[in-house]
């Protein structure tokens, strides 16, 4: 039960949160703000660090001398999920902490970022990913080249359809968690204290990696897959690359639709076909 | 020492226990929030079963002794996924994702009967769809590697499995009651800071203890979904354990929390004098 706030001049009709207005589609005004470029730099650096730590963990694991000498698939999943938690925590107030073109796409569909900002973020994320994996290659050249370069490919025994489905559902889980964590209604429920909203986002990434690493090495982040494919530059990595863009973007689309039209019931509210509890 | 708030009409407590949910509340059938909650429970349970059973099959499909995520990874998948999904759906449906939790909350009068029944149906359907997705994606290893179904492991008796399920579910539902207690909310200054986290950790802990015995049910929808899709004789033979155990555990947790920790009966009898600020 969210607390009700009665304020003069405001027609909150029993709600103590305000949905922000949709972001303008083309907002050229923000091109003149330093905060826009600071956000781009933050996304670039965050994605660079994300790819460096995670791909270095992958190569380090694969370099193991015995079957149980590396950090294991569990350790790799922790590297991805834990790093997202740390970086989203650091950049949430600066750029919104996307670090993932699929998340940016989902938030764009929900009108939370403008088209200009969305494109800027995606480019910065892809460039950051390339640089991050480039660092790993520079530091570990020989094992990097011999051990698959941390690239995402469809594993033996799985079809492309399975890989696509796994990427769609995995990204749905992630973007759905992002929407829940950033929902103004939830913020009101938490008395507007954004305590550790990044934690469930990091956990969502961790969980999806546990489930999907055997299938594709887990993309659910087109920048991550793109950065590894560019630096590794292997035929199979490029052949399968489309899965790691189509899947995540479809998953983000589904999550945006689910959150906006079912959970927030924006279409049904517009139709007025059900009477919602005014305080819920 | 919880802060004391002196307000008109209150006797030294800064929290209010919500009134018991009506047993039959047909009015809520007309609200969109009711159907939205059911959809949320369905989707959450679907995602829960997909990620967890996919993790189980992926682990069993490993090529060498440490080729998979390990039993620790499987436990993390269950516990972490409950944390994420309870976090996402807490404000929409209460984030049950488990018929045993729904049953426990129903016994504590926190949900009405139509809502409890609808949640359980949605959870079971979501579980079937979630495991169905795993089977669709990993057809061959799914069938070959046990389908993620819960069965009593070799070397353990049916009674042991039942006991493990009862205690495991007691831990989970007791944690849910503690996390959602209005008294605790007052202690936390009414900021529900990461209430889902201890619930997810409770699931994680119980999985660490119980995976060797039954693969860990403590969630009838999870066991039901896997049994339906795997459709194996042994899975169905043992299936009653994964409904009776969790429901008995939820009953015990509800009784413990309501009658001992919150002292509902003793307050009614007034045979002990409670500290009015406690």
Image (cartoon, coloured by chain):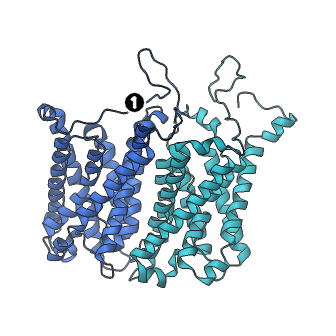
Chain colours: A blue, B cyan
Q: Position of residue B161 (x, y in %)?
A: 68, 72
Q: Few, some or many C-alpha atoms within 10 Å of disc 1 (few <14, some 14-19, many ≥20)? A: few
- For the N terminus of chain A, give its image quadrant: top right
Instruction: Kindly tell me whether residue B156 is visible in this rendering.
Output: yes
SS state under label 1? loop
Near-viewer residue (B217 or B211): B217
Q: Residue at x 77, y 40 (%)?
A: B263
According to the image, label 1 marks what residue?
A18
Q: Residue at x 87, y 36 (%)?
A: B269
Which quadrant of the view contains residue A29?
top left
Q: Up-down: is A35 above or below A4?
A: below
Q: Position of residue B246 (x, y in %)?
A: 67, 62
Q: Position of residue A249 (x, y in %)?
A: 27, 57
Q: Residue at x 17, y 61 (%)?
A: A227
Q: Is residue B142 left or right of residue B180?
A: left
Q: Position of residue A251 (x, y in %)?
A: 33, 58
Q: Is residue B80 left or right of residue B21?
A: left
Near-viewer residue (A253 or B215): A253
Q: Up-down: is B271 above or below B104?
A: above
Near-viewer residue (B263 or B129): B129
Which quadrant of the view contains residue A212?
bottom left
Q: Residue at x 86, y 33 (%)?
A: B270
* Marker count (numbered): 1
Q: Is residue B10 left or right of residue B134?
A: right
Chain ID, mark 1: A
Instruction: Kindly tell me whether residue B65 is visible in this rendering.
Output: no
């Amino acid at each position: 039960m969210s607390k009700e706030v009665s304020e003069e001049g405001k027609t909150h009709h029993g709600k103590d949160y305000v949905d922000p207005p949709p972001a303008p589609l083309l907002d050229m005004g923000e091109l003149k703000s330093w905060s826009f470029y600071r956000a781009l730099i933050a996304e670039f650096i965050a994605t660079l660090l994300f790819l460096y730590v995670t791909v270095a963990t992958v190569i380090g694991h694969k370099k193991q001398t015995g079957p149980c000498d590396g950090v294991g698939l569990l350790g790799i999943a922790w590297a991805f999920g834990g790093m997202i938690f740390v970086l989203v925590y650091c950049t949430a107030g600066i750029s919104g902490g996307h670090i993932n073109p699929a998340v940016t796409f989902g938030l764009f569909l929900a009108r939370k970022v403008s088209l200009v900002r969305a494109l800027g973020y995606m480019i910065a994320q892809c460039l950051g990913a390339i640089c991050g994996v480039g660092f790993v290659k520079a530091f570990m050249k020989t094992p990097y080249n011999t051990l698959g370069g941390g690239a995402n490919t469809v594993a033996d025994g799985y079809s492309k359809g399975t890989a696509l489905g796994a990427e769609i559902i995995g990204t749905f889980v992630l973007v759905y968690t992002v929407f829940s964590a950033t929902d103004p209604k939830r913020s009101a429920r938490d008395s507007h204290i954004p305590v550790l909203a990044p934690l469930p986002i990091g956990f969502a990434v961790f969980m999806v990696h546990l489930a999907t690493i055997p299938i594709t090495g887990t993309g659910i982040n087109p920048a991550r897959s793109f950065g590894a494919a560019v630096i590794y530059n292997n035929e199979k990595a490029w052949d399968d690359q489309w899965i790691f863009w189509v899947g995540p973007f479809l998953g983000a689309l589904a999550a945006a639709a689910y959150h906006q039209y079912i959970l927030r019931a924006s279409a049904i509210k517009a139709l007025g076909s059900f009477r919602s509890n005014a305080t819920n």
